[in-house]
Amino acid sequence: MERKLIIITGHFGSGKTELSLFYSEKMANETKMPVTLCDLDVINPYFRSRDYKEHLCNNNIHLLAPQGDLLLADLPIVTGEVSAMIENTMVHGIIDVGGDKDGALALGQFSNIIKKGKYELWFVVNGNRPYVSTVEGVIQTVDEIETASRLQVTGIINNTHLGDDIYGPEEVIKGERIAVEVSEKKNIPYMFSFINKKAWDRWVEEGTSPEAKNVTLFERKLLAPWN
Amino acid sequence: MGKVLMKGNEVIGEAAILAGCHYFFGYPITPQSELVAYMAKRLPEVKGLFLQAESEVSAINMVYGASSAGVRVMTSSSSPGFSLKQEGISYLAAANLPAVIVNIARGGPGLGNIQPSQSDYFQVTKGGGHGDYYTPVLAPSTLQEIVDLTQEAFRIADQYRTPVILLGDGMLGQMMEPVEFLKTDNQIVIDKEWATTGTKGDGSPKTITSLDLNDVKLEERNCKLQEKYKLIRRNEIKVDTYLMEDAEMAIVAYGTVARICQSAIDRVRDEGMKIGLIRPISLWPYPTDVIASYCERLNKIVVVEMSAGQMVEDVRLSVEGKVPISFYGRTGGIIPTVEELVEQFQMHGNGVLR
């Protein structure tokens, strides 16, 4: 079986961590090869992949993040294990990169070894976030991330929503339109819409589910303490 | 503009700009750095000025300068950096200068950690710096409320010529929620005839100072400040209540924790407990009278904070011994869970209210 290396980037607050958690779980369930999720987020202090260590462990996913108490720090720590994981073709790797070009800078140092093998670099779009709510804004962010990471974006994912699940299907359509247009202009494949299952189920019940191209449903993990 | 999905820190920045604040001086510190980063990117777009100071002390003194010139100005920090600003806040208060200062609090004391906390309550509500002064303190609990209260903070600051503090915690700064930016009257910047923008030769020089070498004059300044605080106490109290109509037990909490309490209240309500929430929004002036007004029919008050017990003192002063008060708090940046609060509320209500 061929190993997969999936790198997830985007504007900060676009859903990279949610997608990283979902995909590592999906890969752990669907393949026999071990899965490592690498938390390379040097931007966010909260809501990071590392905060779900126990959940990942229960799903046989190895978490690669700063060790011990440093897990809870806001220090830009990137352990030496990251390059080992990138080069290890016996494990699937998912890299959750911190937001924007600043977060992608931490990824750039590995560009040479990443380019030696096959990789996918996904760009997540939430069209309701400032600065990525237009095609131009997304293209600018894609360009900045490609420059900082010294890698090419290989796929665009639509994750347009308004938090929780109390929003309409028009958000998905709006995001898909932006993502598809970026995909055409930049000649980067459009991949799928990433949709909260709770919202989707409600739309199905109401008969309003959107006619999105490809749909991947997920159960939200990054929740507020009162949810 | 419809709804957008933003981080709390970004919302503060956008709301401030909407309120006409085009000047920001700050220094990054987790968990409020996104606010500094947002202003750095956004202010040039509205032809405003963002300047990263060399320290929090510099930033607050830049605020003093900008405010003296009559513009709406803001700075922000998190607990340790907010402590560094105290001298400057005392100067602003003494010099009758409007400004908005944001504290997205984190675990303390000392360097502490970067997790959310409410342990700066004493500091923000009892003066914080030296001398006899208070600052109005607004404590939002949702991101939409941040939009409203940030703008309100500028209105209060200008109206009373006082520094105003917007208090949140790391969770509020980091979490994302949909928000809508609506036009309000608070966006109108009033004319500041006292601003040191030059007299054009038509009057005596305008000065802004907090120095009074003459003791009588300094007492006069103090008396005027106290008059102002009396006025603010009378006009600017904000409080929200939830299911208090028939409540026999009240929870008092503010900010992030109030939302967790609300979820826990919903659960124990389902079991038939008559319980409600009083949520102070202005922490100074404190809604003393509102809390006191419920005393007659309450059997118990439980105060919940992410601190070792600070606001609980103001609740005690409000009820003057008429209702037994208990406290439940977590420290160190730990956020209480809905489950643990349900357990606490059941324990306190047990045998009394069922």
Image (cartoon, coloured by chain):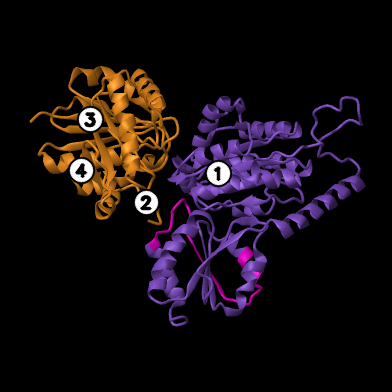
Chain colours: A orange, B purple
Q: Is residue B109 visible?
A: no
x and y percentages locating residue B322 in the rendered image = 63, 77
* B40 relative to B168, above or below: above
Judged from the image, the secondary structure of the residue bearing numbered disc 1 is loop
Point out which mark residue A166 bears. 2
Please tell me if label 1 and label 3 are on a single chain.
no
Q: Which residue is mark 4?
A: A25
* B106 relative to A75, above or below: below
Q: Which chain does tag 1 point to?
A: B
The answer to the question of whether label 3 and label 2 lie on touching residues, with beta carbons closer than 8 A, is no
Mark 2, Cα crowd under 10 Å, few <14 / some 14-19 / many 20+, is: few
Q: Quadrant of the N terminus of chain A?
A: top left
Span of residues in magenta: B314-338
* B112 relative to A138, above or below: below
The answer to the question of whether label 4 and label 3 lie on touching residues, with beta carbons closer than 8 A, is no
The picture quadrant where one finds residue A77 is top left
- Which label's residue is closer to the chain start, 4 or 3? 3
Residue located at (72% from left, 51% from top): B134
The picture quadrant where one finds residue B270 is bottom left
- Which label's residue is closer to the chain start, 4 or 2? 4
Q: Quadrant of the C terminus of chain A?
A: bottom left
Which numbered disc, 1 or 3, marks the residue closer to the eye? Answer: 1
Q: Amino acid at mark 1?
A: Leu
Separation (CA) of disc 3 from disc 2: 30 Å
Please tell me if label 4 and label 2 are on a single chain.
yes
Q: Amino acid at mark 4?
A: Glu
